[in-house]
């Protein structure tokens, strides 16, 4: 059965068609004027009382390397916050879809991107598990008219329009300086990374390696891949400690084994408590801040996780709706946290306010 509003519109359109036919037969100028006025009135009448025009939607997919990673959870909060602000202040409803593989899987992430293309989202912001694996799906999205940007981890050979991140090489170099200072510039050190091939992690490792050229008495004896898995990270750290009991330092390019319960890495904890082992790690999550306060970590290098989401949604919105264009790389900067400013970072997490600059480390 036809709804009253639909019947009303049908009748109005029939009246308009009849009036147009009559007036056109008359060919009078004044009747043409009345035709225009009548058309305006009928179109206005077609809208039911109290009905407001439907707002357009802008759907942006925010794709992580994996689900359940706390740094991505914080970025998700930033993305949703920016979407809420843009919706409240503009004429478009900005909707964010947060997706990612369960674990850091480049093949599954590529499948997710292809699925987004078939669903027809308006834009995609993605942290790539593998720069090469992301090229084809990103290029397919762009060819389909869907702009793509990367954040955190890039695919520089793809047709993404911009990359939002820290300078990972510079951050790796800073980590080398911090670890060298902690161990007096001499001794055996090891590195822990995540998924081999992830460009952001590879650049951190490269920065660390190149900077160690300034410290000829420091030697890298092992590089462990955790595949961003807590248990694999713990296993790699403990096996390395067994193989090199005289190890002086660790560089964790990510925080994965630090999520394990206390006691999960007994050798690492033992030598750290004895003062013979020092660790510099990426990220500044609360669990790491607690470890630092307890003396297990010497320095942390933090990314602007919340801004991954907040800024990428803003960029995608302005790129699509306002025609704004960006340089290929946008440097967010990074934080260095030590015992001198760890309390300030703790307060930032407790208040969820990361807008204030940290005291010097």
Image (cartoon, rainbow, N blue to C red):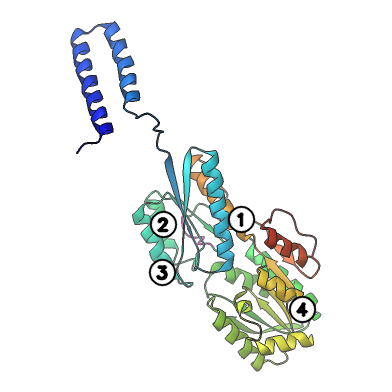
- In this rendering, the answer to whether 134 lies above or below 214 is above
Query: Could you tell me residue 11's position as x and y percent?
Result: 22, 25
Residue 218 in the magenta stretch? The answer is no
Magenta stretch mostly in which secondary structure? loop
Closer to the N terminus: mark 3 or mark 4? 3
> Where does label 1 land, which residue?
307
Quadrant for the N terminus in the image = top left
**Secondary-structure class at tag 2:** helix
- In this rendering, the answer to whether 201 lies above or below 235 is above
Number of marks drawn: 4
**Secondary-structure class at tag 1:** helix
Q: Nearer the viewer, residue 276 or 53?
A: 53
Q: Of circles 2 and 4, which is in front?
A: 4
Which numbered circle lies on residue 295?
4
Q: Does residue 103 appear left or right of residue 48 in this picture? A: right
Query: Could you tell me residue 309's position as x and y percent?
Result: 56, 56
Answer whether residue 120 is visible to the viewer in this image: yes
Answer whether residue 315 is visible to the viewer in this image: no
Query: Could you tell me residue 94's position as x and y percent?
Result: 48, 46
Q: Nearer the viewer, residue 156 or 54?
A: 54
Separation (CA) of disc 2 from disc 4: 47 Å
> Where does label 3 land, which residue?
108
Closer to the N terminus: mark 3 or mark 1? 3
> Where does label 2 land, which residue?
139
Quadrant for the C terminus in the image = bottom right
């Amino acid at each position: 059965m036809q709804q009253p509003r639909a019947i009303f519109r049908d009748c109005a359109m029939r009246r308009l068609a009849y009036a147009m036919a009559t007036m056109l037969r008359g060919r009078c100028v004044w009747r043409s004027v009345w035709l225009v006025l009548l058309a305006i009135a009928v179109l206005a009448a077609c809208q039911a009382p109290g009905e407001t025009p439907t707002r357009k939607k802008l759907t942006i997919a925010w794709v992580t390397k994996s689900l359940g990673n706390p740094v991505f959870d914080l970025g998700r909060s930033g993305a949703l916050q920016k979407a809420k602000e843009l919706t409240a202040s503009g004429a478009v409803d900005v909707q964010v879809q947060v997706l990612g593989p369960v674990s850091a899987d480049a093949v599954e992430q590529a499948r997710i991107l292809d699925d987004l293309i078939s669903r027809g989202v308006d834009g995609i912001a993605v942290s790539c598990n593998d720069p090469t694996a992301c090229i084809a799906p990103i290029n397919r999205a762009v060819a389909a008219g869907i702009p793509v940007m990367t954040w955190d981890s890039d695919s520089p050979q793809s047709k993404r329009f911009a990359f939002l991140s820290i300078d990972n090489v510079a951050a790796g170099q800073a980590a080398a300086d911090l670890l060298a200072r902690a161990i007096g510039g001499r001794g055996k050190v090891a590195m822990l990374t995540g998924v081999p091939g992830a460009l952001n992690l590879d650049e951190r490792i490269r920065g660390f390696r190149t900077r160690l050229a300034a410290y000829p008495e420091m030697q890298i004896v092992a590089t462990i891949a955790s595949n961003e898995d807590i248990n694999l990270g713990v296993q790699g750290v403990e096996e390395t400690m067994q193989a090199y009991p005289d190890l002086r330092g660790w560089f964790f390019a990510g925080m994965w084994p630090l999520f394990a319960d206390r006691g999960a890495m007994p050798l690492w904890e033992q030598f750290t408590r004895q003062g013979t082992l020092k660790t510099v790690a990426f990220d500044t999550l609360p669990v790491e801040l607690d470890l630092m306060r307890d003396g297990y970590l010497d320095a942390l290098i933090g990314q602007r996780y919340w801004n991954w989401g907040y800024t990428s949604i803003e960029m995608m919105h302005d790129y699509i709706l306002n025609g704004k264009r960006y340089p290929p790389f946008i440097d967010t900067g990074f934080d260095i946290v030590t015992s001198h400013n760890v309390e300030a970072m703790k307060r930032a997490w407790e208040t969820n306010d990361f807008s204030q600059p940290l005291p010097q480390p």
